[in-house]
Image (cartoon, rainbow, N blue to C red):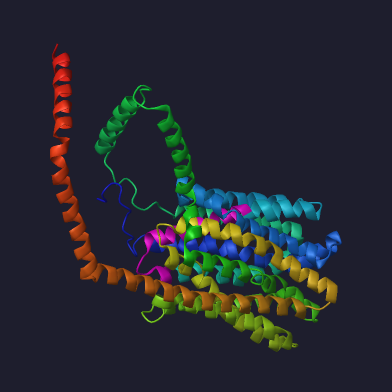
Amino acid sequence: MQPPGRAPVPPDGGWGWAVVFGAFVSIGFAYAFPKGLAIFFKEIQDFFGTSYSEVAWISSIMLATTYGAGPISSILVNRYGSRPVVMFGGLLCGVGMISAAFCTSILQLYICVGFITGLGLALNLQPSVIIIGKYFLKRRPIANGLAMAGSPVMLCTLAPLNQFLFENFGWRGSFLILGAILLNCCVAGALFRPIGAATTSAKNQDALTGKITEDAMEMGNPKNVPMENKTEEGGKDCCEKINQYLDFSLFKHRGFLIYLIGNVLMFLGFFAPIVFLAPYAKHTGIDEYSAAFLLSILAIVDMVARPTTGIIANSKWVRPRIQYFFSFAIAFNGACHLLCPLASSYKGLVVYSSFFGLAFGMVCAMLFETLMDLVGAARFTSAVGLVTIAECCTILLGPPIGGTLIDTFGDYKYMFIKCGAVMVLAGTFLFIMNYYNYCMLAKEEKEKKTKEEDPKSVRTENEGRNNWNKDTTQVEPELEPLREEQEGVKKEINGTNEV
């Protein structure tokens, strides 16, 4: 039995693999679904008579809501656990897409697809990532890699499926069917069994409740607690409740701040190339099925890249310096986008999609693992919530900025160049700052060891303690009258009490 008050030890297997499968499904929908909807964008644009940038807001709002609702998801997970949050999120996804099938304006699509479905995906993403950290420790990079592989598997399936649904049922009928498919997130959430449940016996709970009740009755007497202390304790309780759900002290954590700045910059160019890959292929004269197949190629390579990256990241050579590996993956992703305009034929786009899938899978496999490496499993829930709400601004702006560049210049290459330049810059920033962080950590660790091993500092501490004892002994005779007076007062009090 797990001792009360102590965090359960991650089992690193067992039911954890069922949890990984549930996370595979939930994370797969959360990441792949906004990208898969790009198949319908050209038709929705023609139906409502909108521009590229206006239609791109659908995916942007959905992605931004998925990330921006991170703190809400973290709070709900801390309060209710991962299982009910994911099941409720799956229900929201289904309701959002079914409602979208009856929309009569682009604004209504923003609300139903963007906000409602995006919020449902947020309630799927965060709990899935968090619960893996509770079930795994030694095998965590591998478990994260397998769970994150759900995104390319779902994308590989959704891209041709969406094209098939559109041709047979139109975009409205497709949205109805997709809403029903998203309800499978509720089934995935049912697999998220709480770890370490029922660690305290009912008898111990009753005894603890009784003790707390007695203490509360004693402390609840207004004569016993000064008013100033009550006010101070009330303020402390409020701050403690906020910090219980979101640990704002992370903003003093050097590694967390480096990760946050680098990722906020990265997401400005992370999703736009996927959103516009199929429309770009159609723009160059490629047929619809071949354009959708590019997303499948990207997803197949991504599918292999994520677990492979997890295995490499878990090796003894990479894991101690995993932040460098993550920085390289981001810069490699940006380099692929910079070279994309050179791919003028379908074969060139197939090559680009393959390298893009490799780079994208590498980044996604390490996205949360690197954060947990920096802040630890205990603060990871709060860290995810704070990071995602900061990232949602650039996620929201990325695709519409790309759409604006396309509308302005009538060419997709400027969108790819913008995304590539931003990601290369983000990767370079993270590499340099992580080198600085590793150097500072090594220096701080060296100073700590030196302080612990230096005999002079220990000797000085002992001398100070001895001098304090001597001073106390010398002062004792001067305190004798006061001591006698206190004893007299005690006798009087005892005498009064006895009467």
Using the image, determine if residue 73 lies above or below residue 139.
above
**Can see residue 310?**
no
Q: Between residues 359 and 94, which one lies in front from this camera angle?
A: 359
Residue located 66% across and 64% down the image? 394
Residue 349 screen position, x and y as percent: 69, 84
Q: Which residues are magenta?
A: 119-143
In percent of the image, x 73 and y 57: which residue is there? 173
Q: Does the magenta segment cover residue 201? A: no
Quadrant of the frame with the C terminus = top left
Please provide percent x and percent y for residue 17: 40, 64
Res. 236 image quadrant? top left
Residue under the point 27% across and 32% down:
211
Relative placement, left or right, of 105 versus 314 is: right
Report the label total: 0
Magenta stretch, overall SS: helix
**In the displayed structure image, the side of residue 20 where residue 102 appears, left or right:** right
Dividing the picture into quadrants, the one containing residue 452 is bottom left
201 and 304: which one is in front? Answer: 201
Queried whether the magenta region covers residue 120, the answer comes back as yes
Q: Is residue 457 visible?
A: yes
